[in-house]
Amino acid sequence: MGDFDTNLWSHPRLLAAVTSEDWGAVFRTYRRLTGISQMKLGELVGLVQPDVSDIERGQRRVTSVEVRQRILAGLEVPPEALSRELISASPVPSLGLAGTEPDRDLLTRVTNAIDGAQRVDGAMLDWLDRLLAEHRRAEDFIGSRPLVDVMRQQLSTVVDLYAGARGPLERRVVRLASEHAQFLAWMAQDQGQSAAALAWYDRSHEWALEAGDVNMAATTLSMKAHMAWSGGRGSRCVRLAGAARWSAPGASLGVQGMAAQMEARGHALLQDGDRARRLFDEAQVLIARAAEHPEDEPPWMYFYDETWFTLQRGMAALHFRDWREAAQDITVGLDALPENYRRDRAWYGACLAHAFAGGDEPAQALAVALSSISDASAVGRPHAWNELHTTAAVLLRRGAREGRQLTEALAQHD
């Protein structure tokens, strides 16, 4: 450990909180001393942000030995800070910080709970929360196709756990099922399976309402608005995004911002520039406020930041055929987008190529399109792939030789 961490664990209040196993005080004090968010602390200890918040506020107790082990390992609590009881109860954890596999005891408990031989406990749901978060991030890199069957089975496991859940855990299971259904809906939408996506969004919305999860309820409506936008249905996009806003007034600022920008995109599709720009400005304010307290955002909003918003403004500019503004915004957003977001980089790269083609810059359009082909073919079908074909068509209509070159390059990957 560095000097900073050594000094950190000599802090009397933090030391007293660990010794007394007051984990809410440990989290609050650790975050105050380090300045990290609840989300970042959750990543360190293998918990999702809502659970960190519940522990800090005393609404959830840490009774699982496994969770206790993860906290001690994740925060790098030195042995001299531990009481004798904690040391004896805290062997070296078998679950690595970057791993998602359950230890044998946890796996046995999950299996028994599914078989009805044991009740569900918090550790099981903690692990499933963490596993879902890891799959969300994996999908950014490898795309949705390899994960669909895995996530279907994982949702089946969550549903099977419901029979063994009691009290507050029942609501957690339903909330977890809602999140899995939303993720399955998004993956179906990503693959162009509209009917399946709508069915999963409806199921997710129903479960979210049952669990009292206003953030997920609003998110599913915003994602259905996104589907309408993708299909060129501006009025339906506006209605669904508006419903996401007024039907869930208690949603987080980020979720409200998502709904506002989706409504803006609907108006952009309808060529109502004034309303679109006003709503984009409103969404930007909400995003800025959300960024001040990222720990208040649900875990699936990890991607929603200024970079993503800049890209959405670029997409709206495409609708207005403001090619220069579209190219500028998408370029800025792409430069800030993580390299491992292969699917998103393929999609926005294809849109940038379209913007260059529309702006009569065929050489730049071809260069960007060619750099996007590999990922668009591997993880960006059908959306990014179709957008590249659209770009080729624009170039061909303008009589640019680059249109033929792009068409030939695409044919090699068909």
Image (cartoon, rainbow, N blue to C red):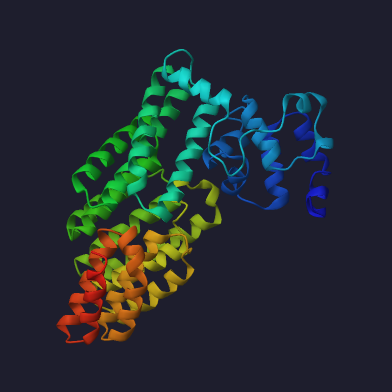
Examine the rendered structure and indicate whether residue 54 appears above or below residue 281: above
Tell me, yes or no, if residue 298 can be seen here: no
Q: Is residue 363 left or right of residue 21?
A: left
Q: Is residue 102 left or right of residue 333?
A: right
Q: Is residue 365 left or right of residue 239?
A: right
Extreme-front residue of the structure: 412
Q: List x then y, in percent, for residue 169.
A: 47, 24
Q: List x then y, in percent, for residue 215.
A: 40, 43
Going 31% across and 75% down the picture, which residue do you hit?
Answer: 353
The C terminus appears in which quarter of the rendering?
A: bottom left
Q: List x then y, in percent, for residue 194.
A: 20, 48
Tell me, yes or no, if residue 163 can be seen here: yes
- Looking at the image, how many numbered discs can be counted on the residues? 0
Extreme-left residue of the structure: 397
Q: Quadrant of residue 92?
A: top right
Q: List x then y, in percent, for residue 37.
A: 60, 50
Going 70% across and 36% down the picture, which residue do you hit?
Answer: 72
Going 84% across and 36% down the picture, which residue do you hit?
Answer: 80
